[in-house]
Image: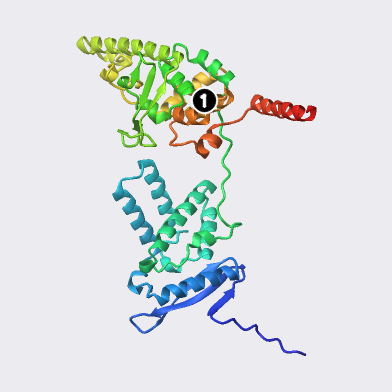
Amino acid sequence: MKRRTKARRGRGEHSVYQRKDGLWTAVVEVGIDDRGKRQRTQIYARTKDEVMRKLAQRKDELAHGDVPRRRETNVTVGSYFQQWLDALVAEARRAPGTLDAYRACVKHVRNATYGIGDVKLRALTPELLEKFYARMKAAGVGDCTRKAVHKVVSQVLTRALRNKRTTGVMENAADLVDPNLKPRYSPKEQLAQTAEEAHKFIKAVRGHRLEALFIFLAFQAPRWSEAAGLKWGDIDFDKHTITIERQWNSRLKAFAPTKTGKTRVIPMTQLVADSLKEHKRRMLAEHAVYTTWVADPPAKTRKDRKTVQPPPNGSRCGTDDLVFVSTAGTALNRTNVANRDLDALQQKARLRRLTPHCYRRGTASILAELGTHPTYAAAILGHSSVDQMTLAVYTKTNKPMERAAADALDRAFSTRQGT
């Protein structure tokens, strides 16, 4: 029987081998530490040619003295991720909501039950990440959250790779995770109002205290936070324009710049202008009632306390402040308005249950149906450019649009066949 011999490695291949999961690995010696022990690092790739290319690149770096310092490479995943998060907070360049999302992801990474916070950063491998994602799923963490965590992990490891001199990270392990084991999330279909629903909605909101707000959301497509932060000084009834230069941060209870950081001036439709003028008269009337109530409050007997209530508006309903306020005169809360007012109006009109953002998407779709150029649509929506967000996320096709496209193809082909 012929004896089997192991294939010999090629010249300069060092310790290059293929794991059981198909991933190719190369082990490289990077030097000697302070205790006289050899330091090794691993390189991963999907193919042998790729790992050999990376190995040659690493050997070239070692030849030029690019050797990580061991004392600094003992940092753990948990501590490095926290350092990354603290640096972002100190920069103050991210929106509060974005920082909250990052904090939640870092919390998952450092979780004591299924996290990888105790793993050495330089020892993090694709296999460890795959097991981490599996433990998250077993713990009941949703697919959307797991995908967000994966994105943050990839982002932080990219930063660590750029600083490999101090971190000891030679590969972005997140990029090498098995595609079949990588967190996936298929978002639900995003709803958008149709033109027919918009007409029914207008009839339903007639006479409502926040009629102008709902018409503004349905026909001018602002973000909810931008509508909540709108002031009377931003509205020019003479020029028929609305200036959107801020948004209301309900978590911080303060104003903030718009999402893109830019101010935009949008043309105001006549329907919105009429509703805002009526809304202004209503707010002034409520303010007058409140002023009268403050000057001459009702008798404060025990019986009156149960029956007599203050008027629906506070002193902050003047024409120099917020356009849309609650009955207490404070900035509106999105959840309260959606659950208490919007749901009731939609049920009254027998419409689908839509969120305030659905009206924003619906306006974009109606603009597309009317043939509005994407550049102008992006300007109205407040997008920084005509990007995938404008074209794919907000523009939802409907059956008439699809039918019109099919008819256009028929006409095009019929013309060619006739010539």
Q: Nearer the viewer, residue 86 or 259?
A: 259
Q: Residue at x 24, y 12 (%)?
A: 291
Give the farthest residue toward the left: 295
Q: Residue at x 42, y 63 (%)?
A: 161
Q: Quadrant of the N terminus?
A: bottom right
Q: In the image as oriented, which residue stretches furthest toward the front?
A: 419
As helix, strand or loop, the secondary structure at mark 1 comes to helix
Quadrant location of the C terminus in the rendered image: top right
Residue at image coords 75%, 27%: 415
Answer above or below: position of 102 versus 132: above
- Report how many numbered discs are placed on residues in the image: 1
92 relative position to 172: left or right: left
**Furthest-right residue in this view:** 418
Residue 283: horizontal and vertical position, in percent? Answer: 33, 14
Residue 22 in view (yes/no): yes
Pinpoint residue 406: horizontal percent, then vertical percent: 70, 29
Q: Amino acid at mark 1?
A: Thr
Q: Is residue 298 visible?
A: no
Q: Residue at x 59, y 81 (%)?
A: 10
Image coords of residue 51 (percent x, y): 55, 70
| Closest to the observer, 331 or 177 | 177
Residue located beneath label 1 in the image: 363
The colour scheme is: rainbow
